[in-house]
Image (cartoon, rainbow, N blue to C red):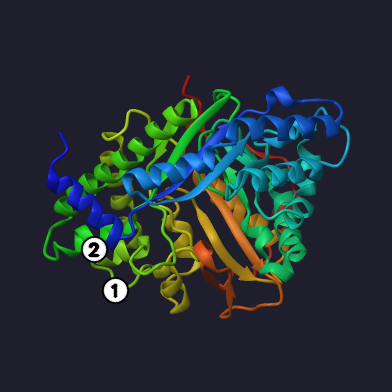
Amino acid sequence: MVSTNDILETIKMIQEENLDIRTITMGISLLDCIDSDIDKACGKIYEKMMRVAENHVKTGEEIEKRYGIPIINKRLSVTPIAMLAASAKGNPVKFAKALQKVAEGTGVNYIGGYSALVHKGFAAGDRELIESIPEALAETSNVCSSVNIGSTRAGINMDAVRLMGEIILKSAKATEHDHCFGAAKIVVFCNAVEDNPFMAGAFHGIGEPDTVINVGVSGPGVVRAALSKMPDADISEIAETIKKTAFKITRMGQLVGTEASKALGVPFGIVDLSLAPTPAVGDSVAHILEEMGLERCGAYGTTAALALLNDAVKKGGVMASSHVGGLSGAFIPVSEDAGMIEAASCGALGLEKLEAMTAVCSVGLDMVVVPGDTSPSIISGLIADEAAIGMVNSKTTAVRVIPAIGMKEGETLEFGGLFGSGPVMKINGFDCSKFISRGGRIPAPLQSLKN
């Protein structure tokens, strides 16, 4: 039985504390669209996606009106396009343009899945797709890309790491006129998951059903508001409060996912528990950490505070839904979090501290802006370090780094909207090119041998 107090509390969370559903993402398998003729394959993709997702945005809007719950994004994710490119002759960018046409036809915010999984090596279609990413993202506005270059079971594909450093820089240059936004639509993963509803890294895994609905919740402002009421609490009490708050947030995500599933006739997949911040005042993960007692995010103690937050969110959320998945934890994107922006701008938060934080958070180096003259090998070095953290700790890590072409440390790259603004961060300029250029594969760690 839902009490009046619970209802009023939820209304307050929505109206005053920035609580929302960050995304409902429909995953769609394109395996039945494979064709040796790339134009026919693109035609099949458009037909299937328009048919299946025709009412996706409308359904989300109806749920918003019925329950008064803001649903910020309605998105689609698809089978990694490299798998279709393996059979089709022609420029893979045609697939990206087909996806863009679907985005415009359905009204969704983004489509994820212009992706390749190369953690153990390149298969047919993989390299062709990866090399086409800069062009594909420059010529589309709603298509996102991801590449998985490592895993705990496979190790790290250093040839792919080297290639992705080059691809990210090329993508930034190809969209220099648009705030280098192409690079903001690329995520490089280690241990990528198949049911992630968040962009830019969403794709529809091959172990997923033909179609599925996955939900990503938010609510950093709600957690911070709860902690602000207990200034003298000890750490155990803080953890308990975060757990209870995460439970309430996740129940709302469960409700939305269930309702969308029924309305669309599509199976309900998972709720992703991740606390996804925005640049809005009061919607910051960094400010949660500061509410715990840090002067600024980045001070000593930040990694410990983030570990507490991430663990408590998972423990509270997992009790609120039968199907928890995706990334599930706390995101720390620099440009999308008002507190992170402040901390980076004043010098409290640097890349090295961010890297340490990624060992205990939900993903990795996310929406980090670096100087435009950063070399591809240094970007690859960032990717390799982050992948190593994920590989050794059996967790998902990722890099979404934006070289700000023509800009230097201390300047600010403005994106606008949910993407905010990114201070150009200081980067270690010492050369790692010889290490990166060696190629090959970093072997899987001993803890991978679990059978």
Q: Are marks 1 and 2 in contact (CB under 8 Å)?
A: no
Which residue has dot 1 on it?
295
On the rendered structure, is 368 left or right of 103?
left
Q: How crowded is mark 1: few (under 14 residues within 10 Å), some or many (20 or more)?
A: some
The percent coordinates of residue 208 (x first, y second) are 55, 25
SS class, disc 2: loop
Q: Can residue 393 be seen in this view?
A: no
Q: Can residue 383 be seen in this view?
A: yes
The percent coordinates of residue 437 (x first, y second) are 75, 52
Residue at 79% x, 48% y is 132
How many numbered marks, from 0 up?
Answer: 2
Viewer-side residue, 362 vs 48: 48
Residue at 59% x, 36% y is 54
On the rendered structure, is 52 left or right of 374?
left
Q: Which mark is residue 292?
A: 2
On the rendered structure, is 162 left or right of 287?
right
Q: Given the current orientation, which residue lies at the most extreme top position? A: 451
Q: Which amino acid does label 1 sit on?
A: Glu
Q: Residues within 10 Å of mark 2 (few under 14, many from 20)?
A: many
Viewer-side residue, 163 vs 317: 317
On the rendered structure, is 68 left or right of 352?
left
Quarter of the image holding residue 300? Answer: bottom left
Viewer-side residue, 143 vs 324: 143
Q: Which mark is residue 172?
A: none
The percent coordinates of residue 164 (x first, y second) are 70, 51
Residue at 63% x, 63% y is 402
Viewer-side residue, 264 vs 360: 264
Residue at 72% x, 65% y is 375
- Seen in the picture, residue 147 relative to 446 is either above or below; the reply is below
SS class, disc 1: loop
Mark 1 vs mark 2, CA separation in Å: 9 Å
